[in-house]
Image (tube, helix red, strand yellow):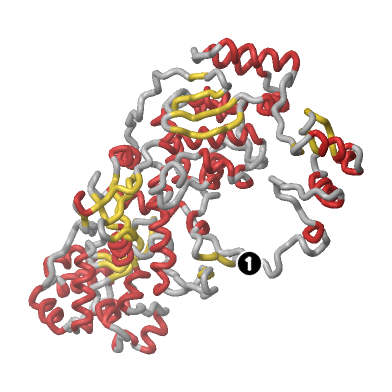
Amino acid sequence: MPTLSQSLHKYDLSFLRNLARLWGLELPGEKKTTIIEQLTARILDPQYNQPMLQRLSPEARLILEDLTAHQGRLPLAAFARKYGELRRVGAGKRDREAIWRSPQNAAESLWFYGLIFLDFFEGETGIEEFVYLPPDLFPHLPFPVNTQPPQFEAVLSAEQVSLACATQDYLVDDTCTFLAWLRKTQRPSSSDTKLKKHLLLSKEHLPGIPIPLRTEFLQAILSDAGVLDINSSMPLPEPARRFLSLERWQRLAWLYEAWLKSTSLNELRQLEHIEPLGEWENDPRIPRLFITNQLRSLQIEQWYELSPFAQYIHDHYPDFQRPGGNYEVWLIRRRSDQQFLRGFESWFEVEGQLLRYLILGPLLWFGLVEVGVKKGKPASYAFRITQQGNSLLQKQAKPLAAPSDEQVRVLSGGTIAIPRLFAPTVRYQIARFCEWEDYRAPHYLYRITPESLRQAQQQNLKPQQLIRLLQRDNALLPPSVVQAVRRWVLHATEIEVIELPILRVRSADILKRIQKSPCAKHLQQILNPTTAVVKRGEETKLIERLFELGFLADAKLRVKTEIEGQAGCSQPINPPSEK
């Protein structure tokens, strides 16, 4: 930071003369450098500065103490919220009204006495304006000066925390799943709730995950990085192949860097409890860089409670996503009661919740942190940085789990089991030929069906390619599976298993009577003397005609009544509104 002499050089001659009078110094000379030399000597002279410091008000001493606790500087926005504004007026008005004689608060008093100054420095979120103390004033202050940035030290012992969720490197697996799903379905992921059950970072597979992975997250960073087409949101073949061919660690680090740089993904606008309104814009990269910088100062594998961490950020770096410190410009509304969240008093509902989302969402998805809960307080989250996370923060290569030595297994029933750690390029291709069944650790399960092969053909994929792919990767491939696929290629579907409505009667005489009645037109096929197939969609009419014939049929299916079928009666009265 600038010295006292350097700081005084920013002022005009008139201001320096006013400052000299406050320090009891008469300056007959007109040369600015001479005045600054004499002023600097006077202010740094204990004979003069100590009586001055002793005469300061308690509020002014509190300001100096706060500055010394923060390396001698505070962001101007945070300083003004705590201690009041510093009036910055033109030289003419300043001298005409002599505002230096009547400071409006303790902060202005220190400013007019040349003890604090304003300048722009590199802060946590970039270049911003600070109030600062010149370093050559430090030895004269009655407070010890902390030359190190503040540290968050509220830690929890391992005995105080129950591990709730550790995501390891599941994000790279879910990215492969996501890309394969897009190629198979040929539609944006946001329209498919079915995809979510196949993602490992979900409640289904990780019940303790506070915020399940959102497909918009992957779509945004993959689009920004050029793996997805910006217009169609579909994978671009060559970029997708290059990405999936990387080692697991390289894929995770690649995703992490893409997230840090992404501008289309905006976590503030993903907070569910608030509703941003209007045309204002925020830079989502700023809070990401801030929170990752903060994590670098924490100890690896040490538990930290989330709520006190948010309080620490509030006290020391409140403007981390608003470098200007203006809490009136962004129009944000609370969804629950439609109240607008303005002013610094709304910090915990906006900035505090954003910090919570970043830690319990993206940073957990990357495996950068693990999440726990404080014992006895299930709603009180804690987090700790993992070894994997530290490698990401420090941009150091860290090999993750080794590729699986286990082979792909194809069961005789057509189910394909692919180990989670198997080559993602292989799973990506196999998944496009199959129905997706489930994930049962540590295997992804797919099934070969006629419908899945038809869908593959519609995308110009040939079933023979699936067989060659499985044989190339030494899959345990039963001959019956090869034969079944080849027969389907030659003859399409030879056997069909279908579900049909069946009519069963107690005796053959009853079925003969039905065949001779108007009910017969609703029958499709007689299977045996007491069983017949009913035409699909005509079950209700058949039951009604049987009643007219004197038979009360016991229906084992949901049958729509005549009243339910009438217009206006198919919906419940006053249906509950969805929230």
Assign the N terminus to one quadrant of the image: bottom left
Residue 187 in the image: above or below residue 79? above
Residue 578 in the image: above or below residue 523? below
Residue 328 or residue 310, whichever sits in front: 310
- Circle 1: residue type: Ser
Assign the C terminus to one quadrant of the image: bottom right
Residue 99 in the image: above or below residue 503? below
Q: Residues within 10 Å of mark 1 (few under 14, many from 20)?
A: few
Residue positioned 23% across, 59% down in the render: 150
Residue 172 or residue 205, whichever sits in front: 205
User: What percent of the width, then of the height, locates residue 60?
Assistant: 22, 79
* Residue holding disc 1: 577
Residue positioned 42% across, 26% down in the render: 421
* Residue 323 appears in view: no
Residue positioned 66% across, 28% down in the render: 452
Residue 145 or residue 415, whichever sits in front: 415
Residue 243 or residue 148, whichever sits in front: 243
Does residue 404 appear left or right of residue 33 in this picture?
Answer: right
Q: Please identify the quarter of the rendering in which residue 527 is found.
A: top right
Identify the secondary structure beneath mark 1. Answer: loop
Residue 232 in the image: above or below residue 268? above
